[in-house]
Image (cartoon, rainbow, N blue to C red):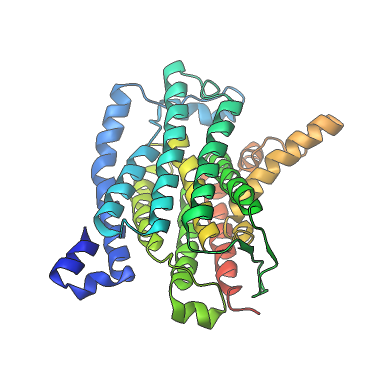
Amino acid sequence: MLYWLHLYFDINILNYITIRAGIAFFLGLIFTLFLMPKFIKWAKKSSSVQPINNWVPEAHQLKSKTPTMGGIVFIISTLLASVLTVKLTNIYVIGALATIMTFALIGFQDDMAKIKNKLNTAGLSAKAKLFAQVLSAGGVAVFLYIFADFDTELYIPFIKNPLIDMGMFSIFFWAIVMVSASNAVNLTDGLDGLATVPSIAALSSLSLIVYATGNSVFSDYLLIPHYNVGEVVIIAAALIGSLAGFLWFNCHPAEVFMGDSGSLTLGAFIAYMAIISKVEILLVLIGLIFVIETLSVILQVGSFKLRKKRIFLMAPIHHHFEMKNWSENKIIVRFWIIAIISNLIAIITLKIR
């Protein structure tokens, strides 16, 4: 809407991505702060609360009456703020909105199944969820391959020239990146605010990179690829604002959880931003906390199957520290610190040749 106001009424200031991104941020924040208390009230009345597994640390049993599926609220806030501020005809914006909506739908279905059956393991089956994620990610990847105006070359940190041209294999690679990131954020979302701040940090870093990629002056200076992806920064800003509003209620002790509706969507959109800015490999550093959480699960499962021994007291790794009697707040804040530092390092790598 604001973009079209610029066109029809010649309001030049609304032509700038940074201005509309700032407006989108505050709209997302305001919408979430307004809608979330209403959602929490409804969730408590309808018993839409978080089912807790018996095997998790004892302290988690106290969270069994905490409303879940709050991710739907910040996703709706993000979409509303985006529609009001972004140029909807931009091909990368269409891909971004498609990513958010399809993964939010998968998460919503999973959350509803858990709530209905009052059991954390009673959501979509692992195969059904993975199939839906692959289908959604594959659809977005094919869309980018066919319609987006960028190449299929793969870049790695510290080297300004592309490593290889992936060609049609890029469809499979992008789908794998999106599904992996989606599940990684989902695994991390186990403590109050644990996934929220690292997501904000990742989205902030990727917003800078995407903006630079979409701006010929910055892309030339940084010697990075240049594509017309800048409008996606506005959606990212709307999501960051919405997440800031969500964190108001999600910080310890949490009044609401994001559920799969939020975590699956966050991971997929973070991956989408990395893909369109050609920093898929750098995503390992940008989402370091998510990588650590995922690796802890892989190592735990692999070790138990091969050696019948566990590496950690419990996985994902945040539960390991809980079992070592670390306070929940200490685990959360320390993970936030790691996330912020890793993102600062990721940003620094952009100029290193």
Residue at the spot 46% in from the left edge and 16% down from the top edge: 117
Q: Is residue 196 left or right of residue 347?
A: left
> How far across and how far down the image is residue 56, in percent?
59, 29
- 128 and 257: which is toward the camera: 128
Residue at the spot 32% in from the left edge and 57% down from the top edge: 89
Judged from this view, the residue extending furthest toward the right is 307
Residue at the spot 60% in from the left edge and 61% down from the top edge: 152
Q: Is residue 349 left or right of residue 108?
A: right
- 319 and 98: which is toward the camera: 98
Residue at the spot 61% in from the left edge and 55% down from the top edge: 288
> How far across and how far down the image is residue 68, in percent?
40, 32
Report how many numbered discs are placed on residues in the image: 0
Q: Is residue 92 left or right of residue 275?
A: left
> How far across and how far down the image is residue 160, in percent?
64, 75
Residue 251 seen in the figure: no
Residue 152 seen in the figure: yes
Instruction: Name the quarter where the C terminus is drawn.
Output: bottom right
Instruction: Name the quarter where the N terminus is drawn.
Output: bottom left
